[in-house]
Image (cartoon, helix red, strand yellow):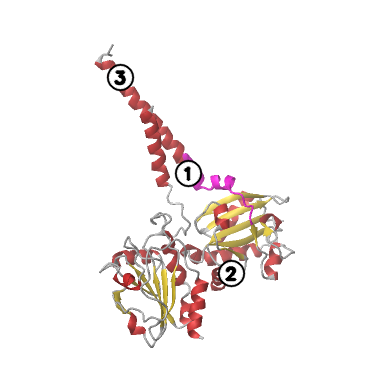
Amino acid sequence: MKAPKEMRSIHNNQTVSTRIGLTALFFIFFTGSLLFCEHGFCEENAIKMDFLLPAPITEIHKQYLGLSSDKDFSLGQIKAQVVIIEIFSMYCPICQRGAEGVNALFRLIQSKPALKDKIKLMGIGVGNSIFEVDFFREKYSIEFPLFSDSNFLIHKKIGEVRTPHFFGLALQGNGDVKVFYSKTGEFSSPESFLQTILKESGIKEQP
Amino acid sequence: MKSIFISAFGALIFFLCLAGPSFCGSSAFGNKIFDPGSLKPVDSVLKVKTGDKAPDFTLTSIDGKAVKLSSFTGKKNVMLTFIPAAWTPICSDQWPGYNIAENLFKHYDTILIGISVDSLSTLFAWTRDMGGLWFDVVSDFWPHGAVSNSFGVLRSNGTADRAIFLIDKKGIIQFIHVGDINIRPDLGMLVQEMKKLTF
């Protein structure tokens, strides 16, 4: 038996309302997910920093990272509480523009006796050959260690982030590494960036 | 129920699009970069070889001047860098890399010319977003891709392959690299080739 016209209309209205409601729920869910990821929370939890890097060529960089051997090393072997990694490319205009700011961050950390042994800074040039990384180092007089990821092997492991991207890693002492900060784009100032790193890692500026 | 799934799927696609492309590249251009995905590595057949005289051309640069290849004969080595298309992932980082290497090119007495089949207006806007470039960028838009075609690097879809030609001061092609369009050529390789011409 066919329902009266008014009943069918109410039923149709309810179906439409349900559809709109569910669509809205999906919108909210995905918007929330994207905002969550946009601020690095997804990456921080998902990324495993379990790759090896070649031992630095210079003795200064080996000492800076607290490495004693010439073998490949993992991030957990670095003698520090926190490691900041800039994922960069020689070809990236923002990395070029921001190079002086990252240098200033390095100098800022090194100028603080209470921090210089706790926080280390390094860069990984994704898709950059050793020549290109060296060229970038010389071009911008970069003093902290830079490494080449010419075949994007590390880049794939860390979620294929765009450049520049900054990771803050907490070294757990047992070789484990925890990502506590992950953000794409240049920072506004070395001072504010360092404050963010201190706040999120829990490291105190005073000894 | 079917319509609910369609709505949900639509929402998913909509937000995935909002999330932006996931290619590797700098964040310099925001979400303006068109990602064509992985392309056929090479889609052209060279019409020149090393030892050949480079086909001459005159193309207009984004500064409005006429750039004639043969005008550099006897004066400078010339490196031509053909890129596939403006506003695409690899290309948008390639020239900014050369932009910080001006001293290297000068050191090896080589001038660099960027060539694209894009229109002048497109190239103007794109290179402005790079912050400007020190080398000439010329448009091979019309007759479409004629210069790219004369070198044999015009792809079947009207874009160009990612190619480098190094031409010595006699106008002779000394080095050709037509690499995988999805990969940027190593600057170290280009420097090695320029070095061969100089010393």
**Part of the protein shown in magenta:** A32-51
x then y, percent, for residue A43: 55, 47
Indicate which disc residue A35 carries. 1
Classify residue B3 by image quadrant.
Answer: top left
x then y, percent, for residue B186: 50, 69
x then y, percent, for residue A134: 57, 71
Which is more N-terminal, label 3 or label 2?
3
Element class at badge 1: helix
Q: Please give the residue where the numbered disc 3 appears in the rendered image.
A: A10
Which is more N-terminal, label 2 or label 1?
1
Q: Residue furthest top?
A: A1
| Relative side of B25 to B66, left or right | right
> Disc 1 vs disc 2: Cβ atoms closer than 8 Å?
no
Report the amino acid beneath label 2: Ile
- Classified by dominant secondary structure, the portion drawn in magenta counts as helix
Classify residue B68 by image quadrant.
Answer: bottom left
